[in-house]
Amino acid sequence: MRILHTMLRVGNLQRSIDFYTRVLGMQLLRTSDNPEYKYSLAFLGYDGGNPGQAEIELTYNWGVESYELGTAYGHIAIGVPDVYATCERIRAAGGTITREPGPVKGGTTVIAFVTDPDGYKIELIQRDFDAPGAGLR
Ligand SMILES: C[C@@H](O)C(=O)SC[C@H](NC(=O)CC[C@H](N)C(=O)O)C(=O)NCC(=O)O
Ligand code: NI
């Protein structure tokens, strides 16, 4: 089995597509509209998405511009080779870093958080994917 995607409901599909492509560097993989049930989807990811990479599924319910995220949602994590450099690129692209890069509290792994246009938190985790066993942690 494989994790295929994580679905987020968003209030403005193009605003979110712009964020995940221009700020986080993802590719827009495909979109679809469902006029019968009045919603549109956009799938984004890295390196072509499935099957090698999980995807983000953005769902726009026509006319619904905002959601209560509540206290249950945590974050989606993205591994990057250099969190500090990635945060600078995100800022330069107009993104908002909501937790500055640095070691995780009580640990050594370097992390940061960025928030997407709907307020969903995205964690950046420093990960050297070329290191032996990097994908297993
Ligand atoms: C393409 C696949 O990954 C989907 O997730 S589509 C599944 C479908 N999604 C929606 O209906 C989205 C709009 C909905 N109003 C919402 O906000 O979730 C879905 O959940 N279908 C339900 C079913 O029983 O088919
Ligand atoms: Ni889905």
Image: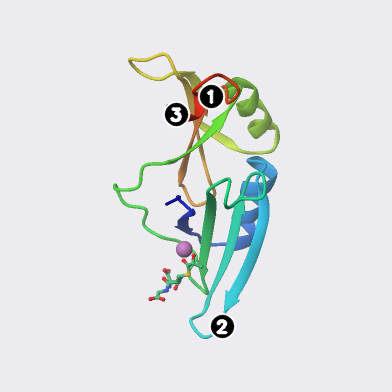
Q: Secondary structure at mark 3?
A: helix
Locate residue 87, reporting x and y percent: 60, 27
Locate residue 64, reporting x and y percent: 48, 69
Q: Which is nearer the eye, 63 or 48? A: 48
User: What residue sits right under mark 3 in the picture?
Assistant: 136
Judge from the rendering whether residue 51 lies leftward or rightward of residue 89; answer left or right. Answer: left
Of tags 3 and 1, the one toward the viewer is 3
Give the spatial CA distance, label 2 vs label 3.
42 Å
The image shows residue 65, relative to residue 37, as above or below, that is above
Circle 1 packing at 10 Å, graded few (<14), some (14-19), many (20+), is: some
Q: Earlier in the sequence, mark 2 or mark 3?
A: 2
One can see residue 53 in this view = yes
Q: Earlier in the sequence, mark 1 or mark 2?
A: 2
User: What residue sits right under mark 1 in the picture?
Assistant: 127
- Type of residue at label 3? Leu
Q: Secondary structure at mark 2?
A: loop
Give the spatial CA distance, label 1 vs label 2.
41 Å
- Type of residue at label 1? Arg
Residue 35: which numbered mark, if any? Answer: 2
Locate residue 95, reporting x and y percent: 61, 38
Give the spatial CA distance, label 3 vs label 1.
11 Å
Q: Quadrant of residue 66?
A: bottom left
Q: Quadrant of residue 34?
A: bottom right
